[in-house]
Amino acid sequence: MPASLADLIDITETRRLLECHAARLSVERADLEWESRLVAAYHKLSKAEELVVQDADKHADLLETYNRQFHIALISGCNSRWLLHFHGLMYDQSLRYRMLAFRVKDFPRDQSRREHKQILDAALARDVETLVTVLGTHITKGAEMYAEHEAAAQGRGKGKRKTKRRVGD
């Protein structure tokens, strides 16, 4: 299926809704096992982020593997098989667009590292409101990069400038 801005917005908003809701439930139902999974997943992700800084081409796949594991660990305590299933579907679809976005614009690696740390800290502190705010922003970032590129490309193609539309608006 060809990439489209409308599809991207729909996928991103659906993933954001599912993941933020599942994260909220995970924090509300948090136990030591969930917390341990989250801390371990963050540790691997933060090490992979360091490796990507050294050699992005060599470690990009490892980073994506550990990024996925971190997001899954975050929501793993929601105790909903269906919520986890649908989140997995939306994560896979959003990955496609994130990969397209990375081809057209440098990824804000430092911002992503800060957001992952903020997500971890908020989850461990059981600060649901901060967690959902940071997580929602984090999820929409790649989509917004792609949307900006598409809007600019359409503007160049028609001789007009398009107004920036924020994903989720």
Image (tube, rainbow, N blue to C red):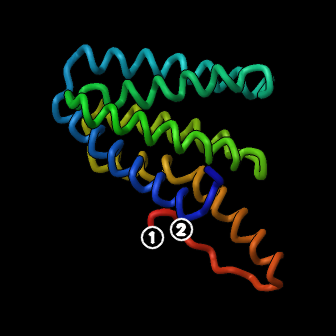
As displayed, is residue 166 above or below residue 86?
A: below
Residue with the mark numbered 2: 166
Badge 2: how crowded within 10 Å, few (<14), some, or many (20+)?
some
* Quarter in which the C terminus is drawn: bottom left
**77 lies left or right of 156:** left
Q: Position of residue 148 (x, y in %)?
A: 67, 65
Residue furthest toward the front? 1
**164 lies left or right of 88:** right
- Tag count in the figure? 2
Residue with the mark numbered 1: 169
**24 lies left or right of 63:** left
As displayed, is residue 117 above or below residue 140?
A: above
**Pointers 1 and 2 in contact (CB under 8 A)?**
yes
Residue at left offset 57%, top offset 72%? 165
Q: Position of residue 2 (x, y in %)?
A: 65, 53
Badge 1: how crowded within 10 Å, few (<14), some, or many (20+)?
few
For the residue marked with disc 1, what is the amino acid? Asp
| Separation (CA) of disc 1 from disc 2 | 6 Å
Q: Position of residue 1 (x, y in %)?
A: 61, 50
Residue at left offset 23%, top offset 34%? 27
Element at badge 1?
loop
As displayed, is residue 76 above or below residue 129?
A: above
Q: Which mark is residue 127?
A: none
Q: Quadrant of residue 75?
A: top left
Residue furthest toward the bottom? 160
